[in-house]
Amino acid sequence: MAALSGDVERAGRLLGAAQTLRERVGLFNPSAFAFHSQLVGSLRSGPGAELFEHGYTEGRGLTPQDAVEEALALTRERPVAVGAQEQS
């Protein structure tokens, strides 16, 4: 949600935190996370790349509780209805 809404720094923080958590519990399987590799690649090479990398580095140091609180804050700021689609 953060990346799609243009908040590349927060997207980096949440992805960094998720990466750390996967490593801590031994749940890292690159093929299982390939679905987001294209989006992460575009964030790392796009106009907000420095913000993304800064957020990613910060996210690697978040506690699990802090990461969850940040993700929940994002959903409160940008609520999304399940199954909702944007209309043009």
Image (tube, grey):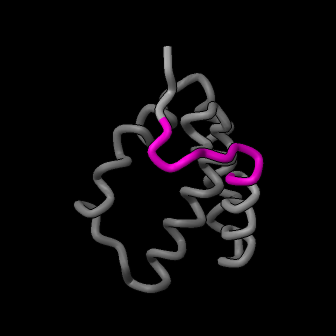
Q: Is residue 80 above or below residue 76?
A: above
Residue at point 71%, 52% (across, down): 74
Camera-side residue of 9 and 78: 78
User: Residue 4: horizontal and vertical position, in percent?
Assistant: 55, 35
Camera-side residue of 48 and 66: 66
Q: Is residue 48 above or below residue 12?
A: above
User: Residue 76: horizontal and vertical position, in percent?
Assistant: 75, 53
Camera-side residue of 84 and 16: 84
Left/right placement of residue 36 relative to residue 71 reads: left
User: Residue 69: horizontal and vertical position, in percent?
Assistant: 74, 68
Q: Image quarter for residue 78? A: top right
Chief secondary structure of the magenta span?
loop
Left/right placement of residue 85 relative to residue 34 reads: right
Residue at point 35%, 39% (across, down): 38
Q: Image quarter for residue 33? A: bottom left
Q: Image quarter for residue 7? A: top right
Q: Residue furthest left?
A: 31
User: Residue 51: horizontal and vertical position, in percent?
Assistant: 68, 38
Q: Which residues are magenta?
A: 75-84
Residue at point 51%, 35% (across, down): 43
